[in-house]
Amino acid sequence: MDISSSVGDIKLFAQTFEDSAATPSKVIRDPTLYEKFQTAAESLDVFSQKLASSRGTVNKLIEDESLYVNVNSASKNLSNLIEHIDSGKGVVGSLIKDEELSGELKSTLVGLNALIKDIKDHPNRYFKFSFF
């Protein structure tokens, strides 16, 4: 191994880095940018410490395997339900996929709303009250 060649490579690297406008050089030379990196690193460290010492939801998701299993199971069930609906199965799937059924239901609701309005506007047409 040629030591003088290695020293030359190191000098070349140092000179290139010195002359560079690359990010590491900017961070070293720009105190404001350095401070931002330092603040971000400190914030990340504080967050990590809080997370490690926490007993909250995020920590429980990380530490409690049964909670993960329950969330995973719920996610699978929801996925299956959505697949079932998306394939047009069941009442909700039929309402979403079957345009004819959806149209009939809308028509029925329009008629029902009209009937309810008429009952409110003219109750005597539908109800007879007699006290004797």
Image (spheres, rainbow, N blue to C red):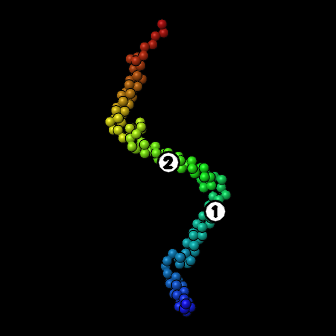
Q: Nearer the viewer, residue 75 or 126?
A: 75
Q: Secondary structure at mark 2?
A: helix
Q: In this view of the protein, can residue 15 be seen by the observer?
A: no
- Nearest to N terminus: mark 2 or mark 1: 1
- The correct choice, above or below, for 44 with respect to 60 in the image is below
- The correct choice, above or below, for 30 with respect to 72 in the image is below
- What amino acid is labelled 1 in the image? Val
- The correct choice, above or below, for 111 with respect to 66 in the image is above
- Outermost left residue: 100
Q: Quadrant of residue 50?
A: bottom right
Residue positioned 60% across, 70% down in the render: 38
- Outermost right residue: 53
**Tag on residue 46?**
1
Q: Quadrant of residue 1?
A: bottom right
Disc 1 packing (10 Å; few <14; some 14–19; many ≥20):
few
Q: Nearer the viewer, residue 104 or 115?
A: 104
Q: Please state which of the two labelled residues, at mark 2 or mark 1, is closer to the viewer.
A: 2
- Residue 11, image x and y in percent? 54, 88
Q: In the image, is 78 to the left or to the right of 125?
A: right
Q: Secondary structure at mark 1?
A: helix
Residue on which the image places disc 2: 76
- What amino acid is labelled 2 in the image? Lys
- Residue 58, image x and y in percent? 60, 54
- The correct choice, above or below, for 44 with respect to 67 in the image is below
- Residues marked 2 and 1 touching at CB (< 8 Å): no
